[in-house]
Image: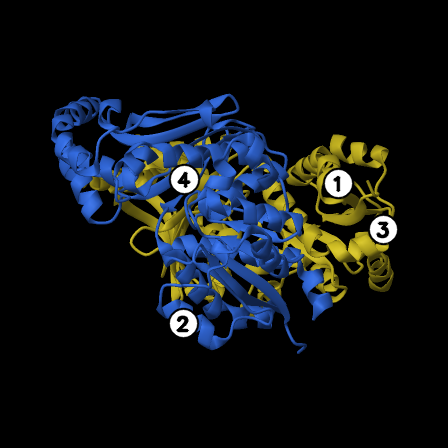
Chain colours: A yellow, B blue
Amino acid sequence: MNKAAQVPVVFIGVGNVGRTLLRQILDVRSAMAGKTGLLLSPVGVADTSGILYNADGLTDRQLQAILRTRFRGNKVGSLPGAQRKRVLDDVLDDGVLLVDLTATEESMPILELGLKHRCGIVLANKKPVAAKWEIAKSFFDSPIIRYEATVGAGLPVISTLKYLRETGDRVTAIEGCLSGTLGYLCAEIERGSAYSAAVRDAKSLGYTEPDPRDDLSGQDVARKALILARTAGWQLEPSAIDVEPMYPESLSGIGVEEFMNSIPRLDSVYEAENKQAQSKEQVLRYIARVTPKGGKVGLTAMPRDSAWGALRGSGNYIAFHTARYDAIPLVVSGPGAGAEVTAAGVLGDIIQLAEYFRVKYEKRG
Amino acid sequence: MNKAAQVPVVFIGVGNVGRTLLRQILDVRSAMAGKTGLLLSPVGVADTSGILYNADGLTDRQLQAILRTRFRGNKVGSLPGAQRKRVLDDVLDDGVLLVDLTATEESMPILELGLKHRCGIVLANKKPVAAKWEIAKSFFDSPIIRYEATVGAGLPVISTLKYLRETGDRVTAIEGCLSGTLGYLCAEIERGSAYSAAVRDAKSLGYTEPDPRDDLSGQDVARKALILARTAGWQLEPSAIDVEPMYPESLSGIGVEEFMNSIPRLDSVYEAENKQAQSKEQVLRYIARVTPKGGKVGLTAMPRDSAWGALRGSGNYIAFHTARYDAIPLVVSGPGAGAEVTAAGVLGDIIQLAEYFRVKYEKRG
């Protein structure tokens, strides 16, 4: 057999998902090389602390060190602009796969540089695709940009939406439960837990961000809804998604501890909402709904004997209503968070882009 | 813009799905050519009545005639073997996409010839991939063979399974409701209809084959379960799937009319089964389950408040249990039959293979 062609991969951000992804790549790459002739080859790792780069591929020793410990690169991030750009210019070449595993807007300049150099771009980071349309538009409808893991983690959500459009279907509405954290919260309230106890438990289990309001605000769900809408071809602005948070405006300007101490007063509100739903054979779910005209994200009562009612705990659920899937929608569901499944979603994108750039890699040998 | 490269497509079998597919291709192809530089071009149509072929692409007049009427080709099917092979040798060339829309084993020789000539193969036909492993094995694990529409019609089932494997997940079990017809039957029995009335209604609505036993036998579901198992990497024989039909053995040797007249005597059996399930807060579903060791297909009582219970009418439901999707499976569900969604599943495969052969088409211009 011929030697496999090298597929250069650069990581931006190396936390839990990044290390999991690296391990998954090392697990699958020899089988993949045998089958496809393409060898995934991590060549660079960068974060705010700096950059580690080796054009021939990071050595086993370097890779193992990254897997074992938190990555610390050289202080490229603090280099003067011109020098930093020169380092990146060496790294970011035609066909290099640039994988953004951060959750920040700060990677935008690197991504834009990557696009200019015809890199492939894989995003787990929602920010670039959920920004104002003016900024985000360059990330849509490009064959060299993928972002499956931004919605539903490893669930085939974005790929399904693209398939529907490519085959000429017309998407009319997308509905879903897009937050494992808020799904857990709804399930706890449904089985009689107090709102404040459910939030406290979710926080201590690590299901929420350090400030639970980052989840309770619904903003992360709104970003996912926006990404779905834009993938469906609807050029909506973030302001077109109406967001109903799971805490009142009055508790937004205070510290985390004060917030946690204040929320028992909300228990009766959610208890009443839950009781009312139950009296109608309904359950509370935090639901996102988008159409070509805009979207809405918030707590909604749904029939108990529906698929929404059957949804358990932190599961995600995404329903596509289309011209062809009209009376009954096409649905993808399952766990929508966690390092393993998020990394798998990213890896799926990497494998697809590697195929897309195949000829380029084979020419280089 | 450069002229788009021609992607030659040959149809085998042109019934309802074939005409729908042809219309879908004509609907999407100019947008696709603009975006990807690849122009889907139907060059041939063949069935048992003969073959219509034009290397430069069938003319608009020819295409419209196929859309309007039932296709009748020249009697290539009845040509002596040597002549027939010569005609096919002209048609079946490297990179030609051969689309099997039949439901028969008779297309196997053409498919094998296609494989020999490095054609891309797209199957809506389950028979080749559900045959004995000795025969079927050449259709698995090849990058130039696709068969998404064989299970769940247009639902992304096969692609999801391939994605799970490619990213290094380990599938442990696959469960599903894979028959819209049997789903309809279960739903009717659940809401109190007699078995015989439900079968009669399904037959008159065209949900069943002319002989309803073709559906009630469970053989079609067993074939789908086998295709899923093999795609998961389990090289099972058809005999490894244990099938429990929805009628007794004693009614298998008789004519259709006699069968229809005999089934009222089964009403009490299914009524009792349904009542027993209901007394336990369960519902009857016709479920397929496969693992690396084999499979089982048959009527099963499932919890009413589960996703199985929430399944309505003819919807399909496919759950993948894997190392990563362990506590909660990854699920794809929705309508799993109908010409529009079946054709869309086939078209999705065609688009993917067109990308795979891109360089070949571009060289030819």
Q: Determine the CA span between mark 4 and mark 3.
A: 48 Å
Please tell me if label 4 and label 1 are on a single chain: yes
Q: Earlier in the sequence, mark 3 or mark 1?
A: 1
Q: Secondary structure at mark 3?
A: loop
Q: Secondary structure at mark 4?
A: helix
The residue singled out by tag 3 in the image is A365
Q: Earlier in the sequence, mark 4 or mark 3?
A: 4
Q: Residues within 10 Å of mark 2 (few under 14, many from 20)?
A: few
Q: Nearer the viewer, mark 1 or mark 2?
A: 2
Q: Determine the CA span between mark 4 and mark 2.
A: 53 Å
In this rendered view, identify the residue nearer to me: A223 or A28.
A28
- Residue at position x 60%, y 69% from top? B55
As drawn, the label of residue A33 is 1
Q: Which amino acid lies under the numbered mark 3 shown in the image of this protein?
A: Gly
As drawn, the label of residue B65 is 2
Q: Secondary structure at mark 2?
A: helix
State the count of labels.
4
Please tell me if label 4 and label 3 are on a single chain: yes
Q: Which amino acid lies under the numbered mark 4 shown in the image of this protein?
A: Gly
Q: Determine the CA span between mark 1 and mark 2.
A: 47 Å
Q: Secondary structure at mark 1?
A: helix
Q: Quadrant of the N terminus of chain B?
A: bottom right
Q: Position of residue B291 (x, y in %)?
A: 49, 25
Q: Nearer the viewer, mark 4 or mark 1?
A: 1
As drawn, the label of residue A183 is 4
Q: Earlier in the sequence, mark 4 or mark 1?
A: 1
